[in-house]
Image: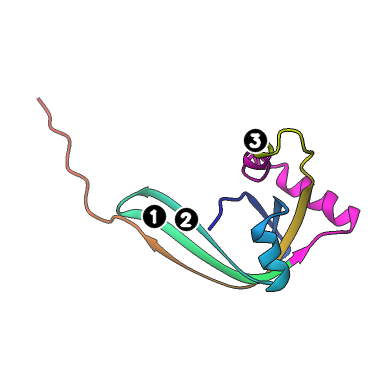
Amino acid sequence: MVPLHFAYADEHLYVLSTLGQKIEWMRKNPRVCVQVDEMKNDTNWASVVVNGSYQELRDPDERKRARKLLDKRVRWWQAALAERQAKSVDELIEPLFFRSQVDSLSGLRAVDHAPKPAPISK
C-alpha cells in the first residue's frame, strides 16, 4: 500500500509516480488494485476498491493530459516526489505518469442513522 493522488477520466485512474519497487512490480504484473477510503467517523465512512490494468504513459500528449487532469488537485505531486527528493537530494527525480484501466469496482458505505439527541433547553 502506498499513498497516491489520482484523477479519474474515461474509465481510467491517472497517477504520477517515480521509478521504484511499485513501478517495477506493476511492469512485471500489470494487474493492479487501488483502495480509496473516506472516514468521517466510526459510523460514517466509505471504501471503494478498483481493480484494473497498469498502463505506463510514454507518449508526451498522454503525459500532458494526465498532468492536466491531476492539476485540478492541490499538491497532487507531493506524495510521489517529496519523499524520493528528500532521499536523493543531488539527483533529479524523473516523474513517471501511468494510468489504470478500471476493469471493476466495488465498495461499502456505513452511515450512522441513529437519531441525534435533542438539544437541552434552559
* Mark toward the start of the polypeptide (1 vs 3): 1
User: Magenta segment range?
Assistant: 55-84
Which quarter of the picture shows residue 31? bottom right
Q: Is residue 92 left or right of residue 77?
A: right
- Mark 2 or mark 3, which is nearer to you? 3
- Mark 1 or mark 3, which is nearer to you? 3
Residue at the right extreme, as displayed:
60
**At label 2, which amino acid type do we have?**
Asp
Which quarter of the picture shows residue 104? bottom right
- Rate crowding at label 1 as few (under 14), some (14 to 19) or many (20 or more) other CA atoms within 10 Å: some
- Mark 1 or mark 2, which is nearer to you? 2
- Residue 46, percent across and down? 43, 58
- Residue 8, percent across and down? 67, 57
Quarter in which the C terminus is drawn: top left
Residue labelled with disc 1: 45
Residue labelled with disc 3: 86
Tell me if label 1 and label 2 are in contact, CB under 8 Å.
yes
Is 69 part of what is drawn in magenta?
A: yes
Secondary structure found at label 3: helix
Residue at the top extreme, as displayed:
122
* Mark toward the start of the polypeptide (1 vs 2): 2
Magenta stretch, overall SS: helix
- Residue 100, percent across and down? 69, 65
Distance from label 1 to label 2 (Cα)? 8 Å
Distance from label 1 to label 3 (Cα)? 33 Å
Residue labelled with disc 2: 37
**At label 3, which amino acid type do we have?**
Ala
